[in-house]
Structures are given as structure tokens and as C-alpha cells.
Amino acid sequence: MRPLFVLILFLSSTILSFSQTKPPANPPAASGSKGGFNKATFEAYLRYLDLYRVPVTYKIDDPKPSKEVPGFSDVEVHLSFEGGGKDELYYVSADGQTIIQGDVYHLNQNPFQANLDKLSLTGAPTFGQPNAPVTIVEFGDLECPDCRMEAPILRHDVPQTFANKVRVYFKDFPLESVHPWARAAAIAGRCIYHQNPETFWKFYDWIYDNQQDIDPDNLKSKVTGWAGENSLDVLQLGRCIDTKATEPEVNQSIAEGRALNLHGTPTLFINGRKIGGLQWPDLELLINVELQHAGAK
């Protein structure tokens, strides 16, 4: 389902205290502790708090002095489960008894700077003015129906309405657990990009237009047939697809998406602001907000 966009400006943080909540019965011994911080007790507390319905493995890093919250430590928690995983950051007090989970903002910084720091745009397909005041980064899945619905908005509505004011980038985030040919399509798309970066966007338009006619068995023949009609080297493309030469690039994009806590597609980062798929009126509103903000600055 494509959620409606609601603009909410607030600083959200959740403060969790072991002293205010009954701890798990029979807490584990102090193995894995760092000062007043005990990893086993911390994990047991999070498991009780989060209550996942599927088996989840926790990997908890050692505490590091926090630059964001004085007097607290940063504790990275890496969760893995069947079909995916995610990373969470907690701030833990020196005695290990109080946890803060949430975002920390500084008024002299972009509130979405943490996202911008994790986004790598080198080698990503792009169109629009290089110095545009608004940048949209789409993490997409070429087999995703919602991505297909959003593609015309990014490709036509945005440039027609905002001319040279918006630059768009595409990053691969195939959802392999539900889309059987998404990864292969991402690999093929990267192969096409390396042959001709501008032709990638023709491929982007074509594969969404023909999404319902593609399956895992005919993907390669469909793509190479299209490539021959668009002046690409079909033999070179076929070799690239067969050897999965661009798979490391796809893997890197997926890892980047996971570091940004992506859970679905399409996901947009608009000047760093993370947003799910948007209908045109909502995206138009948000772009205007960013343009107004840039003008005010």
C-alpha cells in the first residue's frame, strides 16, 4: 500500500530505563560486560521490548563514547533474520541502566545529515541538473509493482514541473524474497549502465512498462532483445549478465539500503529525508518545501 504523505516536524526519542521496567527473570551472568554495560542483559531486554514473531539473531557491538549524547555511549545492534536484517543505534548511560533510542538533531546541521552521510551516489544512474537544489535518491526494485507506479512520476512529472531544480538518482534494492527476477534485472541494469549511462534510463522505462511480461526464464532474452533495438553491444551485455559481473555493485547498493534501515520499495531520500513511495501531489508538496527551505537559507 502506498501511504499518504503527512509532514510532521518533531524531535522523537524514546528513553528506556531498566530501573523503571521489570527486568527479565534470572538475568544472565556478567559475561560480555563492558564497564556497567552487560550485553546479555541488554539483549534480553531488547528481545522482551521488541517481541519479534520470527527467530532473530542479535549481534551487539562494544560501547563507544557518543559524540551525539554526552555522557552516553553508542551501541550498534545488528539484527538478522530470514530474508533480511537491520541495524539499530542505541545510546547507553555509563552505568548501563538507561537507553535512549531515537534521533538526535543539531540546529546548525541538516536534520537528515546522518542519512546523507550513508548515501553514496558515485556510479549511480542519474538525470537532472548537477547543481539542482533538490536531490531525490530512489531505492527501487525493477520487479516491484509500486516502483512501476511511481516511475512515471519521477521520470515525467518531476522534470516537467520543476525543470532544472531536481536531480534524480537510482539505487538498486531488489526484494529477493518476494521478487524472483529482481536481482537478475538489477545486475542487467548495471551492465547496461556501464555500456551507456544514458541508455540506462530507457531500460528503466522499458522494464517497468513490460514488467508483467517478464519472468525469471525469459528475462535475459527480453533484455538482450531490447538492447539490440537500442544500439547496445548484445554480446558484451550477454557476457556481463551471464558472469554476473556487476553483482558486487548490486550487493553494495543493498548493503547501503540496509544501513539506512530500508524495509521496502520504493523508498526515496529527498535531500536526505527518508520517505516511502509518494503520489504526485505529496511529492510535489515536499519538493516545494525543500525549495522554500533552500531559498530561506
Image (cartoon, grey):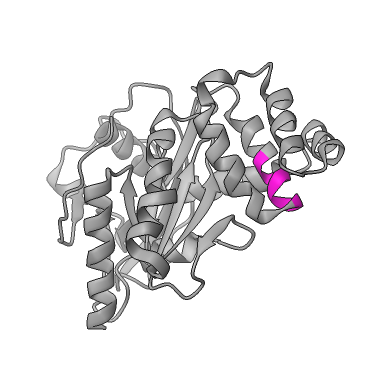
Q: List x then y, in percent, for residue 147.
A: 43, 36
Question: Quick check: 28 above or below 164?
Answer: above
Which is nearer the eye, 248 or 226? 226
Q: Residue at x 13, y 46 (%)?
A: 20
Question: Quick check: 62 above or below 27?
Answer: below
Which is nearer the eye, 218 or 176? 218
Which is nearer the eye, 267 or 125? 125
Which is nearer the eye, 23 or 272? 272
Q: Residue at x 22, y 66 (%)?
A: 289
Characterize the magenta stretch by its predominant secondary structure: helix
Q: List x then y, in percent, for residue 231.
A: 76, 44
**Range covered by the magenta-colored residues:** 189-195
Q: Residue at x 49, y 52 (%)?
A: 61
Residue 226 in view in this figure: yes
Q: Is residue 192 magenta?
A: yes
Q: Residue at x 16, y 49 (%)?
A: 6
Q: List x then y, in percent, for residue 71.
A: 30, 71
**Location of residue 126 by image quarter:** bottom right
